[in-house]
Image (spheres, rainbow, N blue to C red):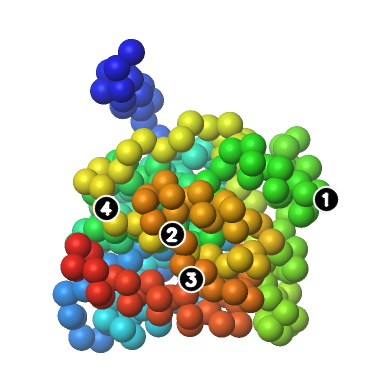
């Protein structure tokens, strides 16, 4: 079967069984002066909500002239509960919100949210995309997670929630009180979505081939350096690395470094303006 025929069948199936609407939490901060820069839509990883970007990155992006929005996927943050949500459900949420912002958006996905963004790129013509500490799925992801966090990973295989620890998410530079506060806010993804992260199909090619930036930390205890390199190679690039940081770059002690690198990249690359 040719690829074009396969894609038509997949889309026909999606049209025949549309996603159920869900209440979605979207937080946003816009610049005081409109500078015409592209809006950013931040998509959190599993267990995180829009709050993870509202803590620092939204206001910082707006202070540099970028309208900034963060979405809580259904079942996360302040969005409607959705225990049976799938990766397709999450992708639908991203595409719907992206289509509602004033101009063609840049999609920024963190962790498993990067996998959702990769799927959304096949359905939404993004200006550009940024994959932050991307968890792109597959059994290699499971093996790495099981090796580094067996107690938190095994329950997810049998329908429970994936549990991430302070040590996995943050560097030692982040004060313990802040780390505990963030960990206490973590929720859980839908059990079907968790399983699909391991077994689901690879994302389809992006519409319009937008530029894609991959960044992360070589000291991330969730995503290995090899996984970062593989993710970047998918988009014919090399990862931008921030040594000494944890998985949650947007919340860690040196959170300004990665967001400034993202904004600098967007400002300098003529294809993203």
Of marks 1 and 3, which one's residue comes earlier in the chain? 3
Mark number, residue 192: none
Quadrant of the rendering where the N terminus is positioned: top left
The mark that comes first in sequence, 2 or 1, is 1
Marks 4 and 3, how far apart in space? 23 Å
- Circle 3 is placed at which residue position? 53
Q: Earlier in the sequence, mark 4 or mark 3?
A: 3
Closer to the camera, 268 or 165?
Answer: 268
Residue beneath the point at 24% across and 69% down: 269
- Residue 255, position in %: x, y? 53, 79
Q: Residue furthest right?
A: 151
Callout 2 secondary element? loop
Which numbered disc, 1 or 4, marks the residue closer to the eye? Answer: 4
Q: Which mark is residue 151?
A: 1
Q: Secondary structure at mark 4?
A: loop
Q: Which mark is residue 210?
A: 4
* 2 or 1: mark nearer the eye: 2
Residue pointed to by mark 2 = 238
Give the mark nearer the N terminus: 2 vs 3: 3
Local crowd size for mark 3, using a 10 Å CA cut-off: few (<14), some (14–19), many (≥20): many
Looking at the image, residue 261 sits to the left or right of residue 179; the answer is: left
Q: CA distance from mark 2 to mark 1?
A: 32 Å
- Contact between marks 2 and 1 (CB within 8 A): the answer is no
Instruction: Say which quarter of the image contains residue 77.
Output: bottom right
Relative to 230, is 102 on the left or the right?
A: left
Position of 262 with respect to 151 (left or right) is left
């Amino acid at each position: 079967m040719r690829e074009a025929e396969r894609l038509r069948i997949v889309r026909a199936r999606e049209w025949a069984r549309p996603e159920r609407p869900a209440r979605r939490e979207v937080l946003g901060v816009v610049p005081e002066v409109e500078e015409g820069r592209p809006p950013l839509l931040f998509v959190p990883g599993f267990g995180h909500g829009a709050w993870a970007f509202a803590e620092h990155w939204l206001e910082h992006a707006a202070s540099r002239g970028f309208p900034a929005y963060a979405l809580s996927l259904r079942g996360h943050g302040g969005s409607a509960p959705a225990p049976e949500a799938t990766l397709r459900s999450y992708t639908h949420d991203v595409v719907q919100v992206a289509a509602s912002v004033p101009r063609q958006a840049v999609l920024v996905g963190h962790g498993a949210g990067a996998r959702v963004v990769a799927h959304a790129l096949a359905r939404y013509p993004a200006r550009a995309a940024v994959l932050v500490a991307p968890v792109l799925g597959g059994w290699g992801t499971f093996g790495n997670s099981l090796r580094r966090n067996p107690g938190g990973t095994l329950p997810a295989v049998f329908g429970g929630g994936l549990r991430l620890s302070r040590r996995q998410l943050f560097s030692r530079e982040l004060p313990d009180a802040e780390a505990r506060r963030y960990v206490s806010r973590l929720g859980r993804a839908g059990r079907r979505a968790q399983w699909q992260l391991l077994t689901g199909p690879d994302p389809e090619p992006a519409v319009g081939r937008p530029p894609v930036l991959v960044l992360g930390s070589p000291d991330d205890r969730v995503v290995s350096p090899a996984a970062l390199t593989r993710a970047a190679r998918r988009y014919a690039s090399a990862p931008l690395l921030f040594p000494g940081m944890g998985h949650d770059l947007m919340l860690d002690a040196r959170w300004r470094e990665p967001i400034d690198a993202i904004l600098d990249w967007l400002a300098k690359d003529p294809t993203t303006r």
